[in-house]
Image: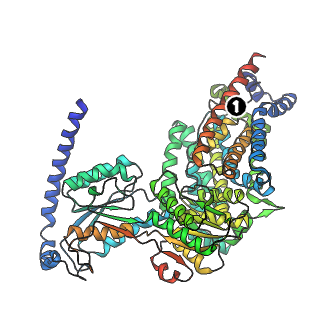
């Protein structure tokens, strides 16, 4: 909720970055996510109240983080896309394609004989390439992002099914499973990757020219163009970034499930959009919060966990999820109105 | 109103067109297969052991849901392979779909094409009942596979896996293994919870456990995919710090369930699968896995459906039975595969 900065001011900052303004933004970062932090704290309190030690157990907290990690990483990329007022419906399908491509028999044989690192590299490369294709079509082909990524969603999923022959590809490369599926100092590697990607995403969005351009294009692409930003190139890069994040998510999911499958990431795009939106990134562009997105992902992951600990069905969870999305957006609107008055 | 009067006419038009083209087509091909089918005219006389003999050439329409996971893909592949084994069968395979209206139109097309029999594995049994009835009314026998129509009359033969039965088999196995253990903690990971087949499986499981005084303590639904299985199992293992047994409804999602169990480093319980994938059977065979058994929900149902469709279309009977017709309903047995008999079942298993 970067609500306290009117869009005009933000664009001004995009062109003339000032040190003090940056510091002010950081303070606002915590303040504007207060609602979400409160929601997460309340949710945790609910978890402790209803499930006691089983919730407040370090293993359980790691489970919540582990299950949030893949959605989280993909959501970081999506935050950039939504900040430039775009949408990416293809991230789930790209993730499936990258996972399948990286786990083919020949790919695994190659990784076995050289290094396991080629599996995550392949996944990231495929993800970035699919994202770049999205970006080129949207930026230079002038096709609306909704349509482009809808087409990619169908095509990438289809290609994943063709490559895998609709079979689940088991991963036999132990090096990969141990490295990405393992732990460092008791923390699962995929959680570490999530943290690294989140921090990198925050720095990229809030501390670099790339980030300022992203905000500027989202706020007003015409003004950004007049300010000398190469809007088309930047747009293509943002979608490439989203694809890359889907590729990173792909190899994380490969380690989590020990497989590559064309069914991976089914429905992921909507979970991602939900997390980004309740995190305070505006679908209309110009405002985006990495911190908010991370909180959004954690809220949904904690919600599923608490419901499961209490043996409640998936259907009840879906109702609660819907309610949370609406309440979060309503609260944001109220805060926005109040802050714009002051 | 204008729509309702216009549509039948259009369909009628399409039907005449298709019928005409079918006529042209059949008159083209009728010359070559005719002699051979006359040669084996015994096709009309049912006799044990004669079923593999070539009969009159038949065209069988085949429509299934999208092969979007291992089990459904195996169903489709096995059916297509089976049809290829018979020179007298031409299988017309419609593109697998999870869209009920698309599947209905596929069956309508088959009726217009005047195929000799239809093997139909509906995405939703109830939704496809009406169009199946339409085929039956048009004199085309429908073989209903796996997911039942709402009325039995809408199909000539129903070939089913035993959903209630696999639940009972899994429950009985767990009862026997735990042998009257007090307060046993039992987890259940079903597939898509809104499907009738899932509800039947869970009911069978519950009833079988009740017989030995046990009940499911934790139940988390997945969605038949590896990813959903991993997610459901991760949360379930946290919800239940101590478990005695888990029944997982689907061997495809079972791969994800196993990954979650390994990640949580748990082995105080045993797991029973369902489906009968080669992966799970190899786990059982290895002896050092938490997977101790899997119940068989055969992936060759659709293949058997094709074989039966061939017999029905050629007016033959099932061998070894006195009945001169093919039976109305065939329910495949929900066997339990364990380390003792895994050798026997492994060749019938599907690669997920």
Residue A243 lies, in percent from the top left, at 62, 49
> What residue do we see at 49% from left, 45% from top?
A151
Q: Is residue A85 visible?
A: yes
In this view, A149 is above or below A340:
below
The quarter of the rendered structure image containing the N terminus of chain A is top right
The quarter of the rendered structure image containing the C terminus of chain A is top right
Q: Is residue A178 left or right of residue B177?
A: right
Q: Nearer the viewer, residue B167 or B111?
A: B167
In this view, A110 is above or below B192:
below
Q: What residue sits right under mark 1 in the picture?
A: A287
Q: Nearer the viewer, residue B38 or B191?
A: B191
Q: Is residue B303 left or right of residue A126?
A: left
Q: Report the number of numbered marks.
A: 1
Residue B14 lies, in percent from the top left, at 20, 46
In this view, B142 is above or below A71:
below
> What residue do we see at 56% from left, 65% from top?
B209
**Chosen colour scheme:** rainbow
Graded by Cα atoms within 10 Å as few (under 14), some (14 to 19) or many (20 or more), the crowding at tag 1 reads many
Quadrant housing residue A54? bottom right
Residue B120 lies, in percent from the top left, at 33, 59
Residue B10 lies, in percent from the top left, at 20, 40
Q: Nearer the viewer, residue A292 or B335?
A: B335
> What residue do we see at 65% from left, 52% from top?
A311
Quadrant housing residue B115? bottom left
Q: Check disc 1 and report its element: helix, strand or loop.
A: loop
Dot 1: chain letter:
A
State the residue lying farthest toward the top: A341
Q: Is residue A233 visible?
A: no
Q: Is residue B240 left or right of residue A143?
A: right
């Amino acid at each position: 909720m970067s609500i306290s900065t009117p869009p005009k001011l933000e664009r001004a900052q995009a062109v003339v970055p000032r040190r003090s303004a940056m510091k002010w933004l950081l303070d606002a970062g915590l303040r504007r996510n207060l609602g979400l932090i409160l929601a997460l704290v309340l949710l945790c309190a609910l978890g402790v109240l209803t499930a006691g030690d089983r919730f407040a157990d370090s293993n359980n907290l790691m489970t919540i983080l582990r299950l949030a990690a893949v959605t989280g990483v993909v959501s970081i990329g999506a935050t950039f896309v939504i900040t430039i007022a775009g949408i990416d419906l293809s991230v789930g399908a790209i993730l499936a394609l990258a996972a399948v491509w990286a786990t083919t028999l020949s790919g695994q044989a190659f990784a076995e004989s050289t290094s396991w690192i080629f599996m995550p590299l392949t996944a990231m490369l495929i993800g970035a390439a699919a994202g770049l294709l999205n970006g080129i079509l949207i930026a230079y082909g002038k096709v609306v992002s909704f349509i482009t990524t809808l087409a990619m969603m169908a095509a990438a999923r289809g290609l994943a099914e063709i490559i895998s022959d609709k079979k689940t590809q088991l991963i036999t490369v132990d090096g990969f499973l141990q490295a990405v599926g393992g732990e460092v100092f008791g923390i699962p590697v995929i959680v570490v990757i999530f943290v690294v990607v989140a921090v990198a995403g925050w720095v990229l969005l809030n501390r670099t020219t790339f980030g300022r351009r992203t905000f500027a294009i989202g706020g007003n692409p015409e003004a950004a163009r007049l300010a000398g930003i190469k809007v088309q190139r930047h747009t293509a890069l943002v979608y490439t970034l989203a694809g890359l994040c889907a590729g990173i998510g792909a190899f994380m999911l490969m380690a989590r499930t020990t497989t590559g499958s064309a069914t991976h990431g089914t429905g992921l795009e909507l979970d991602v959009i939900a997390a980004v939106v309740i995190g305070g990134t505006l679908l209309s562009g110009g405002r985006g919060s990495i911190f908010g997105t991370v909180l959004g992902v954690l809220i949904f992951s904690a919600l599923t966990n608490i419901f499961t600990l209490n043996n409640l069905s998936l259907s009840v969870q879906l109702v609660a999820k819907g309610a949370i999305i609406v309440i979060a957006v309503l609260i944001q609107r109220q805060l926005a109105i109040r802050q714009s008055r002051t | 109103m204008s729509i309702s009067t216009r549509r039948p006419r259009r369909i009628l038009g399409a039907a005449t067109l298709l019928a005409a083209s079918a006529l042209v087509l059949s008159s083209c091909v009728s010359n070559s297969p005719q002699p051979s089918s006359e040669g084996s005219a015994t096709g009309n006389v049912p006799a044990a052991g004669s079923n593999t003999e070539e009969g009159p050439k038949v065209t069988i329409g085949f429509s299934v849901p999208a092969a979007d996971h291992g089990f459904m893909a195996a169903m489709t592949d096995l059916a297509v392979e089976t049809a290829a084994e018979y020179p007298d069968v031409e299988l017309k395979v419609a593109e697998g779909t999870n869209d009920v209206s698309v599947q209905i139109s596929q069956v309508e097309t088959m009726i217009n094409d005047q195929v000799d029999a239809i093997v139909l594995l509906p995405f939703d049994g109830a939704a496809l009942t009406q169009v199946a009835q339409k085929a039956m009314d048009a004199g085309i026998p429908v073989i209903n596979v796996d997911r039942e129509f709402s009325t039995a009359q809408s199909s000539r033969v129903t070939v089913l896996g035993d959903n209630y039965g696999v639940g009972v088999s899994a429950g009985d196995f767990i009862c026997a293994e735990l042998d009257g253990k007090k307060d046993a903690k039992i987890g259940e990971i079903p597939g898509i919870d809104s499907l009738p087949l899932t509800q039947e499986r869970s009911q069978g499981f519950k009833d079988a456990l009740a017989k030995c005084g046990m009940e499911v303590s934790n139940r988390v639904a997945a969605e038949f995919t590896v990813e959903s299985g991993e997610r459901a199992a991760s949360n379930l293992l946290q919800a239940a710090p101590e478990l005695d047994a888990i029944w997982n409804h689907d061997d495809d999602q079972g791969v994800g369930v196993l990954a979650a169990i390994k990640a949580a480093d748990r082995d105080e319980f045993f797991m029973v699968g369902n489906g009968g994938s080669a992966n799970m059977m190899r786990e059982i065979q290895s002896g050092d896995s938490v997977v101790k058994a899997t119940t068989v929900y055969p992936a060759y149902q659709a293949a058997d459906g094709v074989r039966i469709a061939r017999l029905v279309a050629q007016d033959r009977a099932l061998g070894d039975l006195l009945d001169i017709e093919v039976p109305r309903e065939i329910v495949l047995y929900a066997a339990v595969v364990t380390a003792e008999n895994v050798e026997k079942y492994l060749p019938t298993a599907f690669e997920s």
